[in-house]
Image (cartoon, rainbow, N blue to C red):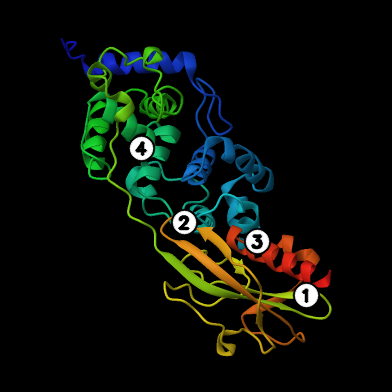
Amino acid sequence: MAAPPIAPQELNRLLLDWYDRHRRRLPWRAEPGERADPYHVWLSEIMLQQTTVATVGPYFRRFLELWPTVEDLAAADLDAVLHAWQGLGYYARARNLHKCAQAVAGRHGGVFPDTEAELLTLPGIGAYTAAAIAAIAFDRKATPADGNFERVFARLHAVETPLPDAKPILRGLAAALTPDRRPGDHAQAVMDLGATICTPRSPKCMACPWHEPCDARQLGIAADLPRKSPKKQKPTRRGIAFWAVTPGGSVLLRRRPESGLLGGMMEVPSTDWTEADIALAEADAPVKGEWRLLPGLVRHTFTHFHLELAVAAASVAEQKVTDGAWVPLDRLGEHALPTVMKKVVTHALAQAGKQKR
């Protein structure tokens, strides 16, 4: 027999009592009774998108060392920000982070807006991030429904509609339970519950504050929720990267356009990435030279597609370029190269080493 329903107030009491005993200590989280720093909350939320808490910790501390305030970050050089961001991926977040810092410093006097509506006007801040900042930093009644929220509420209410179709249903259920009192702690409590107890695999139901009222636990399907629609197969795109090296040991790098994938990052110049096969063509090369394809391919996977890059190499005289720079090999680490381009560099250097032996 199903347990009688529990009033929202009691659900919130159970959750907050659990949170007060088991809350995670995180570098960006205020101590009990202290007010959260909006800059810390915003910075952590941008970093945590598509990234784990364990990964973000060192990056968060490093950013605060380099740029203790939002005004400091706004005044920083974009290349320095992109360089410090290396390893977190999804580099559009870093570009928008910098733009947002400039907007807060320039339009708002270095003070973050405290409502969802105003936060949504800032670069790089969407519905989830606006709700998270409003709730956690300003204790506004807001519902940041991330993956933890979706999992917890899919199980609490036994919602079997697959994601992503279930998202509006789960957001509605989560919003209905968001309390007027301590909404920031409530939001962080749901996040902690999803991260430590109501985990994707092998949920620890006996330790959950919502053990009794959880519909999925009663039905024995907690571990099966939330259901997900089958993933679409990722296409494979292909291209050629051009490894141009001068006799003095400098390599040609080029900045990618600000908009689009890896926007604003430095790259080993390459062709467009297309699903068709690409043959080596002199017209595609960034500078003139006797180009040859190196053995092997560089493979990398992005969110929506797989990428295969052939690498063409040439020894060339250093020449003037309009959209690039010649960088000594021992100074490549000073530039914000995305992971796929680091793979290209590694591949090219390894093949060059083989040819010398």
Circle 3 is placed at which residue position? 342
Q: Which numbered tag is attached to residue 250?
A: 1
Q: Left or right of 29: which side holds 65?
A: right
Q: Secondary structure at mark 1?
A: strand
| Foreground: disc 3 or disc 4 | 3
Name which residue lies at 35% across and 56% down: 233
> Of marks 1 and 2, which one's residue comes earlier in the chain?
2
* Label 2 to label 4: alpha-carbon separation: 25 Å
Q: Provide residue 8's location: percent of width, then percent of height.
A: 23, 19
Q: Secondary structure at mark 2?
A: helix
Circle 4 is placed at which residue position? 144
Q: Left or right of 66: which side holds 169?
A: left
Q: For mark 3, does the 10 Å Cα neighbourhood hold few (<14), some (14 to 19), or many (20 or more) residues? A: some
Residue 73, compared with residue 170, is above or below; it is below
Q: Which numbered tag is attached to residue 350?
A: none
Q: Left or right of 239: which side holds 144?
A: left
Name which residue lies at 73% across and 68% down: 351
> Of marks 2 and 4, which one's residue comes earlier in the chain?
2
Circle 2 is placed at which residue position? 107
> Viewer-proximal residue, 173 or 42?
173
Name which residue lies at 84% across and 69% down: 357
